[in-house]
Image (cartoon, rainbow, N blue to C red):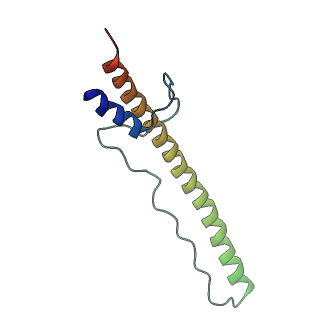
Amino acid sequence: MKKIVFGVLVLLLAPSPGGAFIVGGSNFGSFIYPAHTCGIKPILPSKPFAFSSQQDIDDYNEKIKAYNKTIKEYSSCINEYLDNANRDMQRIREKAKDAVDEMNRSY
């Protein structure tokens, strides 16, 4: 019965190839999985109803330029967090697989 339960657990966790060593960053640091630390998602500047001068257009374009830079940094931070989270899940799958292999090993 234990073999079946652990077998199902391994299937649900979709183990990575046996013996793989996961390289790269991690988000682990405590018993609670941390949220990202990328800050608040930037807000796209609203386009004015009408532009009354070239200065209004230039100001809006500068806001958009600043937004694009900020959203790119935010996106990069989120992607790094997701990459680390995926590596953490791979590590967990490996540990679960190792536990099942140990339990199923003949002595």
* Residue beneath the point at 33% across and 19% down: 104
Measured as percent of width and height from the top left, residue 53 is found at: 72, 88
Q: Seen from this angle, which residue lies furthest left?
A: 1
Residue 94, image quadrant: top left
Count of numbered labels shown in the rendering: 0
Is residue 59 or residue 23 the one in the foreground?
Answer: 23
Residue 79 versus residue 90 in the image, above or below: below
* Residue beneath the point at 62% across and 81% down: 47
**Residue 31 seen in render:** yes
In-image side of 47 versus 30 (left or right)? right
Q: Seen from this angle, which residue lies furthest top?
A: 107
Is residue 39 or residue 8 the one in the foreground?
Answer: 8
Residue 72 versus residue 103 in the image, above or below: below
Measured as percent of width and height from the top left, residue 107 is found at: 31, 8
Is residue 30 or residue 103 the one in the foreground?
Answer: 103
Q: Seen from this angle, which residue lies furthest right?
A: 54
Measured as percent of width and height from the top left, residue 57 is found at: 71, 81
Measured as percent of width and height from the top left, residue 99 is found at: 34, 24
Is residue 85 or residue 46 the one in the foreground?
Answer: 85
Residue 107 versus residue 17 in the image, above or below: above
* Residue beneath the point at 49% across and 63% down: 41
Please state, as top left, top right, bottom left or bottom right, where the N terminus lies in the image.
top left
* Residue beneath the point at 66% across and 90% down: 50
**Residue 26 seen in render:** no
